[in-house]
Amino acid sequence: MFENVPEEIIVKALAMYSAKDTRYLKSAQIGKDTDTNTISLIGNFSIEDCCYSAPNSGHFNAVEAIICFNQMFYVALLAGVDKKMFPFCADVAIDNFDKYWQKVYIVEFEKIKFRKLINSASFYGKMDLKLLRNIGDKVYGDCCFGFGNDEACTGFTGNVKGLIPNFRER
């Protein structure tokens, strides 16, 4: 069951992007499958002026894909903390979340594929973050993601492995 991510959560999670006029994620929905310990996010995106490619190119490139993935990931983390979706974050308030941003590490991007052109004026993104195991003060996760002009999000796909902080207050 998916529910809308409140605008104030998106604004807080993407403050670093809004300050540079690179907030591409416009709205999102989040859900959790407790059987598989997977948090899923579906987002609506629009890139009016890309910070990287030629002006008005109108197509989605690899740099934009990474920026959009990061935006989905940060929103999923903050919304997941806010909604107590992570088993290890019950005692963390979103107001204290800022100290965790710099402790998120991407270990590996893999299986990245462009399958078809994506019109960057309006497109969808989705991700599934599966939390796998604790490693010290971090949690290792595997995240598959995709973008596309339809909700299937198969125009650009990839997989990321990374570490996120164990959110327990110390």
Image (cartoon, grey):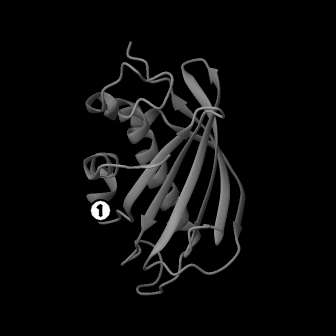
Total number of numbered discs in the rendering: 1
The relative height of residue 24 versus residue 42 in the rendered view (above or below) is below
- Who's the residue at 43% across and 37% down the image? 80
Please give the residue where the numbered disc 1 appears in the rendered image: 20
Looking at the image, which residue is at 49% across and 44% down?
A: 31
Q: In this view, does 170 lie above or below 45?
A: above
- In percent of the image, x 50 and y 36: which residue is there? 104
Q: Residue at x 56, y 68 (%)?
A: 151
Looking at the picture, how far across and down is residue 96, in whole percent? Answer: 29, 28
As drawn, is 67 to the left or to the right of 5? right
User: Is residue 2 or residue 110 the one in the foreground?
Assistant: 2
Rendered view: 163 above or below 6: above
Q: Is mark 1 on a helix, strand or loop?
A: loop
Q: Where is residue 152 in the image (x, y as percent from the top left)?
A: 62, 67
Q: Is 114 rendered above or below residue 18?
A: below
- For the C terminus, the quadrant is top left
The percent coordinates of residue 72 (x first, y second) are 47, 53
Q: Which residue lies furthest to the front in this view?
A: 1
